[in-house]
Image: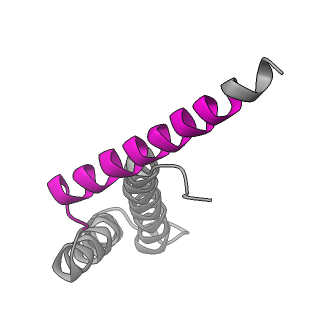
Amino acid sequence: MSDEPDRPTKAVSDFAGEIGVRAARKLKARRHPKPGVWLGLGMMGLIGWSVVVPTLLGAALGIWLDKHHRGTHSWTLALLVAGLTIGCLNAWHWVAKEEKAMQDDEEPNDE
């Protein structure tokens, strides 16, 4: 019989705790609004340039090496692939960093 008075008190404290969590989440959402479309487009541009610049630099260096140091293999092709690889790794780094930041900002679901 002594357990019965504790049950309503525990239910009330659980309910109050849930309300507190939801209120804190709502206040955080108001302080930090979700990023808009322009931020997404800007991020796509940043990722695109992080791939394009190393690729073009590798191709330009390869063309210069092919003109000045002729050999049996193509420097242009080799450095183009190297620049593309570096650019893709760079883009992967940016995406992983943003994904981690988004996961850190997420709260547990309401379920």
Q: Residue at x 25, y 71 (%)?
A: 49
Q: Is residue 86 found left or right of 11 in the rendered image?
A: left
Foreground residue, 46 or 13? 13
Front residue (pair 21, 97): 21
Which x, y percent locates residue 6?
68, 24
Q: Residue at x 70, y 32 (%)?
A: 7
Residue extending farthest to the front is 1
State which quarter of the image contains the C terminus: bottom right
Pick the front one: 47 or 74: 47
Residue 3 seen:
yes
Q: Main secondary structure of the magenta part?
A: helix
Q: Is residue 9 magenta?
A: yes
Q: Residue 77 in the image: x percent, y percent?
A: 47, 74
Q: Quadrant of residue 9?
A: top right
Q: Which residues are magenta?
A: 7-34
Q: Quadrant of residue 61?
A: bottom left
How many marks are shown on the rendered structure? Answer: 0
Which quadrant of the figure contains the N terminus?
Answer: top right
**Residue 13 pos. (x, y %):** 52, 33
Q: Residue at x 29, y 65 (%)?
A: 50
Q: Position of residue 45 (x, y in %)?
A: 23, 76
In this rendering, the answer to whether 82 lies above or below 17 is below
Q: Residue furthest top?
A: 2
Q: Could you tell me if residue 64 is visible in this image?
A: no
Q: Viewed as shown, does residue 29 lie left or right of 109? A: left
Q: Residue at x 16, y 80 (%)?
A: 38
Q: How is the image coloured?
A: one colour
Residue closer to the observer: 37 or 65: 37
Residue placed furthest toward the right: 1
